Amino acid sequence: MDRIDIYGRIVEAIEDAGGAAYVVGGSVRDALCGHAPKDIDSEVYGIGADRLVAILAGFGKVDVVGASFGVIKLRAGDDDFDFSLPRRDSKVGVGHRGFVVEVDPGMTLREAAGRRDFTINAISMDRHGNIIDPFGGVIDLRERRLRATSAAFADDPLRVLRGMQFAGRMRLTVERNTANLCRSLRGEYPALARERVWGEWQKWAAKSVEPSAGLEFLYATG
């Protein structure tokens, strides 16, 4: 049984328990770009973490290390799956870690998508292949435009460097308002953990198809 079949069975079990699961983020973005996603990342609505863990345990080994943040990993045979619960992030300090996270399975898809960094990462897909795109990410992807999903983008300064490596990897150009949001975060750069900064530069260096596009993003955002 391949991982798509396994994933379908997992989603059916989630639906039988009264929940709903959607493929989200980079998994959808990569599929729309014609690339086979390396991982299947899903967001689950309508059920809590304990119920979700119990369901996933019937399919393989569950890692609940990230459960307090609404993230649960599953190893089913040779395949890895990430399941998350929708959450609200409240900014209480500076930098990437200055947040209080509240898991809320009752959130709507639009509310949950609104907390994602860029519109191209705020697209969801149900198990039938139907696309849910509340912020116009499909058009932005087609037009190679990097645009913040909402003003909440400014809550996390690491997103500036994420934009840099996305630009290099997918030949994207930053939209003006998003560039201004990035520029407003310059003062928070020293608060970022060095390993997180390195992680984004490493992705730019290893995965860029047009590295100069990432540097142009940094220039455009100050």
Image (cartoon, helix red, strand yellow):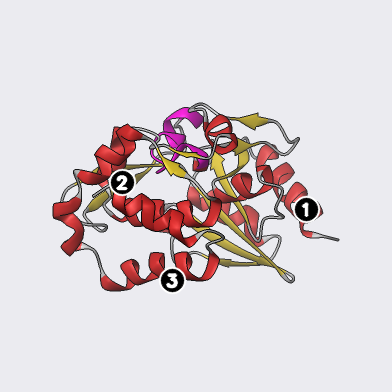
Compare marks 3 and 1 and give the one earlier in the sequence.
1
**Quick one: 160 or 67, which is closer to the camera?**
160
Which span is picked out in magenta? 108-120
CA–CA distance in space, label 3 to label 2: 20 Å
> At x 26% / y 52%, what residue is drawn?
157
Q: Position of residue 200 (x, y in %)?
A: 40, 64
CA–CA distance in space, label 2 to label 1: 40 Å
Residue type at mark 1: give it: Ile
Q: Which of the labelled discs sits on residue 4, or is there none? A: 1
Q: Position of residue 218 (x, y in %)?
A: 32, 54
Residue type at mark 3: give it: Gln
55 drawn magenta: no
Q: Position of residue 195 (x, y in %)?
A: 32, 73
- The residue carrying mark 3 is 202
Dot in front, 2 or 1: 2
Compare marks 3 and 2 and give the one earlier in the sequence.
3
Query: How crowded is the residue under tag 3: few (<14 C-alpha within 10 Å), some, or many (20+)?
Result: few
Is 219 situated left or right of 110 in this image? left
Residue type at mark 2: give it: Ala
> At x 16% / y 63%, what residue is drawn?
190
Quadrant of the image occupied by residue 142: top right
Local SS, label 3: helix
Q: Taking 219 as reference, is 116 above or below it?
A: above
**Quick one: 142 or 95, which is closer to the camera?**
142
114 drawn magenta: yes
Dot in front, 3 or 1: 3
**Quick one: 74 or 26, which is closer to the camera?**
26
Dot in front, 3 or 2: 2
Q: Which of the labelled discs sits on residue 220, or is there none? A: 2
Q: Are marks 2 and 1 in contact (CB under 8 Å)?
A: no
Local SS, label 1: helix
